Image (cartoon, grey):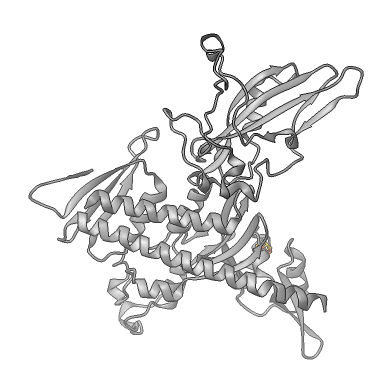
Amino acid sequence: MEHGSFSDHSKSTFSLSDEDHTLANSIRFTLNQDPRVAFCGYSIPHPSDARVNIRVQTTGDSAREVLKDACQDLMLMCQHVRSTFDKAVVDYKMSKPVKDMSIEK
Amino acid sequence: MHRSPALDMPDVPKGQLPPHIELQRTRVLCNFDAPTHTENVQYSGAYSSMGVDNSLRMDQFCNNFRVEVIRLSEDDMEFDMIGIDPSIANAFRRILIAELPTMAIEKVLIANNTSIVQDEVLAHRLGLIPINADPRLFDDLSENDTPNEKNTIVFNLHVRCERGGPRLTVKSNELKWLPHGSEFPLATENTTSSSTSKPKTYTSFSCSQDSLPEFSDKSIGPKHPDIIIAKLGPGQEIELEAHAVKGMGKTHAKWSPVATAWYRMLPEVVLLQEIEDEKAEELVKKCPVNVFDIEDIAKGKKKATVARPRACTLCRECIRGDDWDKHVAIRRVKNHFIFTIESTGALPPEVLFNEAVKVLEDKCERVITELS
Ligand code: SF4
């Protein structure tokens, strides 16, 4: 849900339900790393309410698009982390029997 | 710190951070009184006055990000994750603990319990037993669903301690998997339709779970056979049925697929100047986890070296007293995480991490679709 103004798209608050620090803090990171962002931050209005509010203020671009890009960046990062991790695990498993043998010898 | 008037300052090369700022950016300095520079500089324009771009560039991230597996066994693993922001490393940790689906006993139908363990305590103990079943093969059981072979695992437990015999310890291996579903008839059904050939039970399985291809090769049961559930005295008996369903750690810790998952930043121990002879011996003795070693240098002289910085617990013993903090510096690398995952056994740790990253991806995707 977006709370913004009709005339100025560069500032908005996005209210995401069923999310918490896990997503909000990661998105805050990717938002902060975007040069178009002038300010961003998040808050959890009430601890027993599963909801976060993410505030995005940009230097002129649409806040919604910038937030979407931030999510996209985070997703790409995740995909890279996953492939790198899987590769590292496979490499480790491949090298393991070799290592074991060299200890015995 | 040495101060010089602004006009005498050497020119700072553009496009690269001066060494002391680079140190503050990448390291937590663990001083003897308190750590400093603990914050992470996230803002893209933080160093723009020095001509340094702090924004995220995906290609740069991809080039620098590394994973090194240190240890991997059936249910625990340790790996180094290098070149990632703590906010994201922490997201993975939080997801591992609280947001990965797992199977756990949720409903316990107690037919008889004459042991000294009360029903509710017994049910709670049963809930915490790790179940060796891949949660990805099951559906969620929501409030209006009937329990069926796709969302419920049924176990039966029936033990009796004979009179005159010794006391009995009931362990988790007494939980017997019922692939055909519940065997307890529904109480209301008995009176209305006694003529039907098959009495209705608490679950409605359309087929046996062990006939399904995904379970045919491996039977479902508690991960560990030797978890003590209760102790029975002579004449005491427990008869019950336990229904395991899919859930998430944020609802209850029994649905957490990890015993725990945590990370720490890589410790970095630096000798600021040569430490020789007695001082070196003293330093080696100071450290309780043996981070330092002594190396012989020419002419019978000895000097201290940092041999095992990874073992450092940051107890700060080596910088206590005298001028020791002028000799040794203890730091933590801000973007190097030593990640440890201890699985409870349903899924191997490397699969859990993979799933956790997928969960974060799904969350992003959800937000993107919601915004479009
Ligand atoms: S901080 Fe403690 S563990 Fe680390 S090097 Fe110093 S004495 Fe050893």
Question: In terms of depth relative to the viewer, which is nearer, A68 or B119?
Answer: B119
Q: List the single residue furthest toward the bottom.
A: B299
Residue B16 vs residue B230, the one in the foreground = B230
Say whether residue A100 is left or right of residue B68: right
When the figure is inspected, residue B306 is found, relative to residue B316, above or below; the finding is below
Which residue, as the protein is rendered here, is positioned at the far left? Answer: A7
**Residue B34 visible here:** no
Residue at the spot 55% in from the left edge and 37% down from the top edge = B207
Q: Quadrant for residue B268, please give it.
A: bottom right
Q: How many numbered callouts?
A: 0
In this view, the residue farthest toward the right is B164
Measuring from the top left, give residue B260's x and y in whole percent. 60, 48
Residue B353 appears in the rendering: yes
Image height check: is B91 above or below B240?
A: below
Image coordinates of residue A56 in percent, x first then y, are 24, 53
- A87 to the left or right of A53: right
Front position in the image: B102 or A19: B102
Residue B137: image x %, image y %? 52, 47
Judged left or right of residue A68, residue B215 is: right
- The residue positioned 43% from the left and 58% from the top of the image is B88
Q: Quadrant of ligand 1?
A: bottom right
Q: For residue B85, which quarter of the picture? A: bottom left
- Rendered image quadrant of residue B133: top right
The residue lying at 53 percent from left, 37 percent from top is B149
Q: Nearer the viewer, residue B265 or B125?
A: B125
Instruction: Please report the residue visible at 68 percent of the width from the left and 60 percent of the height from the top.
Output: B73
User: At which x and y percent is residue B219?
Assistant: 66, 45
